[in-house]
Image (cartoon, grey):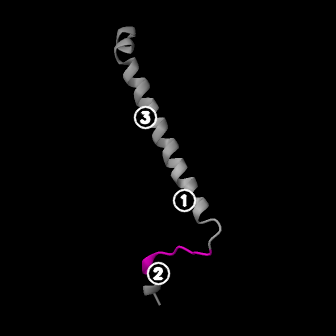
Amino acid sequence: MMETLKRYGMALIFLFLVILLMILGTWGVKTFGDKMFENTDISIQPRGEHLNP
């Protein structure tokens, strides 16, 4: 078990670092998008909504 952990330990650390950075990046983009639409009077509606009478 310890031999396997020593062999793949650095790869696992790198994998978890990449996962953490992806989660932080996704959260940052979502926060930025929410702030962009915060003070606007734009209402986002689906395209097909106007087709239904």
Residue at image position (51%, 52%) is 29
Between discs 2 and 3, the one toward the N terminus = 3
Q: Quadrant of residue 33?
A: bottom right
Task: Estimate the x, y position of residue 16 in percent, counting from the top left.
Answer: 45, 30
Disc 2 marks which residue? 49
Callout 2, which amino acid?
A: Glu
Q: 50 or 28: nearer the eye?
A: 28
Residue 37 against residue 14 in the figure, above or below: below
Task: Estimate the x, y position of residue 27 in percent, counting from the top left.
Answer: 54, 48
Nearer mark to the viewer, of 2 and 3 = 3
Neighbours of disc 1 within 10 Å: few (<14), some (14-19), many (20+): few
Numbered disc 1: secondary structure: helix
Picture disc at residue 18: 3
Residue 36 against residue 13 in the figure, above or below: below
Disc 1 marks which residue? 33
Numbered disc 2: secondary structure: helix
Residue at image position (49%, 42%) is 23
Whole-Å distance between the Cαs marked 2 and 3?
A: 39 Å
Callout 3, which amino acid?
A: Val
Neighbours of disc 2 within 10 Å: few (<14), some (14-19), many (20+): few
Q: Residue furthest top?
A: 3
Nearer mark to the viewer, of 2 and 1 = 1
Q: Residue furthest bottom?
A: 53
Q: Circles 2 and 1: CB distance less than 8 Å? A: no
Residue 12 sits inside the magenta stretch:
no
Callout 1, which amino acid?
A: Gly
